[in-house]
Amino acid sequence: MTLPESSTAGGGPVRLDGPWTHRDVAANGARFHIAEMGDGPLVLLLHGFPQFWWTWRHQLPALAEAGFRAVAMDLRGVGGSDRTPRGYDPANLALDITGVVRSLGEPDAALVGHDLGGYLAWTAAVMRPKLVRRLVVSSMPHPRRWRSAMLSDFSQSRAGSHVWGFQRPWLPERRLVADDAALVGELIRDWSGPRPTGDEEAVEVYRRAMLVPSTAHCSIEPYRWMVRSLARPDGIQFNRRMKRPVRVPTLHLHGSLDPVMRTRSAAGSGEYVEAPYRWRLFDGLGHFPHEEDPAAFTTELVNWLKDPEPDR
């Protein structure tokens, strides 16, 4: 199947046209592409797999209208950001995020992360707490709960089977880009709830972005580290480091029908938060609540960000 050129109008497969502004910023020894709009306190949006910054296309205008400086960044190795040969462990990826906050000239940010972006948002809040004003995580438990669930809960291990599959050399990359990245479309559809994540053209945007050279490999590398380091000193040290509590207000969002990250795996992450923590379960939504029901997700997000004293 040949993807239509309409999906690349304006800025190619990554710098898609919209009310936002595209630019690059330097941080942590690499260059990162961002899309931004609005003025006010910084809200930094972090995408997951198999997506890129465009997954936040519904939230960017809403956050800007609500009085925030909304910035969606492409993680290292994805979208319009640098594809470096190394640096895909969560500690370094978290430093990418906090480095972007500094490069934007802001004293801190509210981090909003989905999937892998959520894993890194948890990490950044522990590693650089002074740079994280608030924390919002969607479809991802705290890293210590992720580790425990993947190792001790057979149902979760099976639900996250793609992570185990990523450990093979080269084959996962080849599968991701085969047939114009058809697998990307399959994953998005399979991981969504009854409501579609987007129309067919939206899925094709994600497919085309995955076809940018080296993106498939770089997208998989963080998951390789997460598994291969489980018994290594660096992984054990990271897990120990993540015992430090999160000390910023945290909003934890999850779809009740998420087939990738089970609700019982995500629930309970509040035990690692020594600050106001709010758990919100979206009934009938899957792994991509911010795209499956953008109105409900954005309303919850904006109301919580504007609440001066979020409750526990």
Image: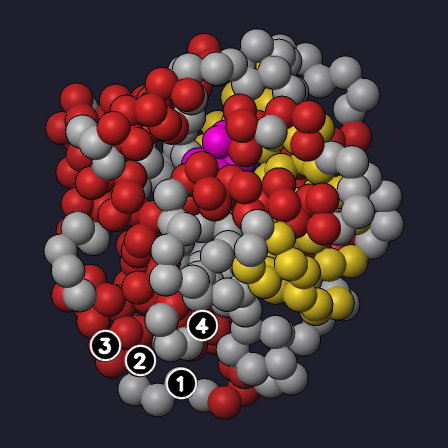
- Of the numbered discs 1 and 3, the one sitting upstream in the chain is 1
Mark 3 Cα-neighbour bin, 10 Å: few <14, some 14–19, many ≥20? few
| Callout 3 secondary element | helix
Residue identified by numbered label 3: 178
Q: Is residue 154 left or right of residue 163?
A: left
Hey, what amino acid is under mark 3?
Ala
| Callout 4 secondary element | helix
Tag of residue 3: 1
Hey, what amino acid is under mark 2?
Asp
Task: Give the prevailing secondary structure in the magenta stretch.
Answer: helix
Check the picture and name the quadrant holding the N terminus: bottom left
Mark 4 Cα-neighbour bin, 10 Å: few <14, some 14–19, many ≥20? many
Mark 4 → mark 1, Cα distance in angstroms: 11 Å
Residue identified by numbered label 2: 180
Mark 1 Cα-neighbour bin, 10 Å: few <14, some 14–19, many ≥20? some
- Of the numbered discs 4 and 1, the one sitting upstream in the chain is 1
